[in-house]
Image (spheres, helix red, strand yellow):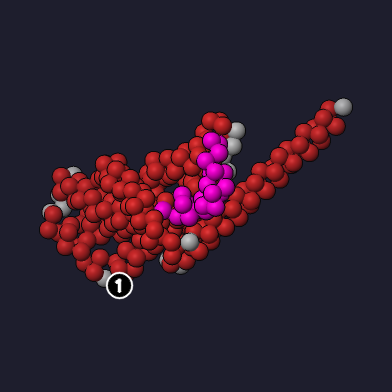
Amino acid sequence: MIFFKNVKKMFYLKKIIKIYFLEIFIGVGEVLYLIFRVAINLPYLIFKLQPTLLVMYISGFKSLFVVSIVAVFTGMIVSLQSGLALKDFGQEELIGQLIVITLTREMSPFMTALILSASVGSSMAAEIGTMKVSEEIDALEVMSIDPVRFLVLPRVVGFSLMIPVLCNYASLLGTIGGSIIAKTQLGVEFETFYELALEVLKSKNGLKDIWVGNFKALVFGITISSISCQQGLNAKEGAIGVGRAVRQSVVLSYLFVIMFGYFISAIFYR
């Protein structure tokens, strides 16, 4: 009897796993289809400039404070920990180069995407999810108004355009925070720090790091906004469904940001 009970449990476990992965594949397909519909509706963006600018304002200006604090302290932490390691070899003056490379290539787009996915992305999922469960989306379709063109297009475009801007802003503030720690904790002069940092940025590899970082930020922006809108459009079962959509949007955004960050780095820095 115990053997058959274990077999039954394993059967149900495999069934649950299959259903879970099937939902993931269906969700990925829905997000890709949503991105495709957004791309088709791009010519209509000229008629949605006001909501697009509003999304850019919310995603950009209203997120400046959080991004600023995180960026400065990220640069300070990286500078302190890396600088102490370099100091053991007498190479602490290279901390400026290390900070710039780390921030522009990886840390700035990554931390900016995570911050905005938790703040702006979740609000997108909540707004559209509330409209879905209150049947406002259905009302738009009855009036022959495309919900993707009316709701999703300005959110995806506005959000995706602001993440690269915030990414460069975070890199700048992180570098400033790193220079302060380099001066106070490691004894590296500001002139030396910024001279080596600018030398890296002006090099061929430095320009590549900047473009790759901005490309990552753009991909992260499209990913987060599309997932958030897709989860909102699929919300059901009232307030519980809206909460579930918000939670799923943040979790999935985090997972895909991490995965896409690795794959983009693997492609450009093999």
Whether residue 207 is in magenta: the answer is no
Crowd band around label 1 with a 10 angstrom C-alpha radius: few (<14), some (14–19), many (20+): few
Q: Which residue is mark 1?
A: 204
At 35% from the left and 56% from the top, the residue drawn is 49
Foreground of the two, 6 or 25: 25
Does residue 181 show up? yes
Query: In the rendering, at what x and y percent does residue 270 appear?
Result: 46, 67
Query: In the rendering, at what x and y percent does residue 265 appear?
Result: 44, 61
Foreground of the two, 18 or 55: 55
Q: Secondary structure at mark 1?
A: helix
Left or right position of 227 against 107 = right
At 67% from the left and 48% from the top, the residue drawn is 22
At 52% from the left and 53% from the top, the residue drawn is 146
Left or right position of 34 against 102 = right
Foreground of the two, 29 or 134: 134
Left or right position of 36 against 165 = right
Foreground of the two, 130 or 261: 130
Quadrant of the rendering where the N terminus is positioned: top right
Whether residue 150 is in magenta: the answer is yes
Q: Is residue 41 above or below residue 73?
A: below
Q: Quadrant of residue 261?
A: bottom left
Task: Read off the magenta span.
Answer: 133-154
Q: Name the dominant secondary structure of the magenta segment.
A: helix
Amino acid found under the numbered disc labelled 1: Lys
Query: In the rendering, at what x and y percent does residue 39 appear?
Result: 48, 63
